[in-house]
Amino acid sequence: MLYLWVKAFHLAAVIFWMAAMLYMPRLFVYHSSAEPGGELEAKMVEAEAKLNKIIMTPAMLAAFIFGVILIGYNWPMPIWLMGKLTLVFGMMGFHGYLSKTRKLFAAGERPKSEKFFRMINEIPAIVIIIIVILAIVRPF
């Protein structure tokens, strides 16, 4: 029964983390087109900081902690789980990239174009589809 509770909290944390990972690049799109020093830029800096601090990072940490507990139930680690973990660590790296980019925007920089942020907005969606397939279908 404890396993199901841990799994439920893991899934909830992943949903919050992925929602934030999909939303942050969208905020960067708006931020890229905002007038430097303007009111919209100030709002974007505030929204990005809150999203990162209140939702994105805590959700990632919760998903990771509950995931580590779930690995204990799936030991030794099957191949599908190794593939999933590889993608999860990739998403954690992407999370770090978004956090670094947020800091650059907050410092008044424009690290990439609006088009670039529109493109990378698709990365979390594609990766989460593969992760869900690995976790549910377990093809390996």
Image: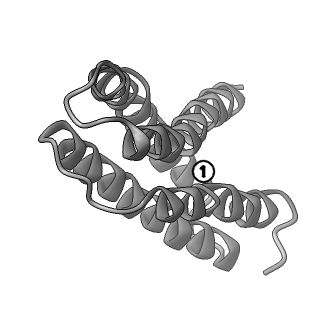
Is 13 above or below relative to 116? above
Location of the C terminus by quadrant is bottom right
Q: Nearer the viewer, residue 30 or 137?
A: 30
Q: Is residue 45 above or below residue 89?
A: above
Query: Residue 122 occupies which quadrant of the picture?
Result: bottom right
Residue at coordinates 51% horizontally, 44% vertically from top-left? 21
**Is residue 108 rendered to the left or right of residue 129?**
left
Q: Residue furthest left?
A: 107
Q: Is residue 139 left or right of residue 119?
A: right
Q: Is residue 72 visible?
A: yes
Q: How has the structure been colored for display? A: one colour
> Quick one: 30 or 126, which is closer to the camera?
30
Q: Position of residue 31 (x, y in %)?
A: 39, 39
Q: Position of residue 65 (x, y in %)?
A: 41, 40
Number of numbered discs visible in the structure rendering: 1
Question: How many neighbours does mark 1 have within 10 angstroms: few (below 14), some (14-19), or many (20 or more)?
Answer: few
Q: Which residue corresponds to the image point at 72% horizontal and 25% vertical from the top-left? A: 1
Is 113 located above or below residue 139 in the figure? above
Residue 69 visible to an observer of this rendering: no
Residue at the spot of label 1: 73
Nearest the viewer among 52 and 32 is: 32
Q: 121 and 116: which one is in front?
A: 116
Q: Secondary structure at mark 1?
A: helix
Residue 139 screen position, x and y as percent: 84, 76
Against 42, residue 26 (above or below) is: below
Which residue shows up at 36% across the image and 23% down it? 40
Q: Write down the quadrant of residue 107 in the picture.
A: top left
Q: Quadrant of residue 96?
A: bottom left
Residue type at mark 1 is Tyr
| Residue 106 % position (x, y) | 19, 37
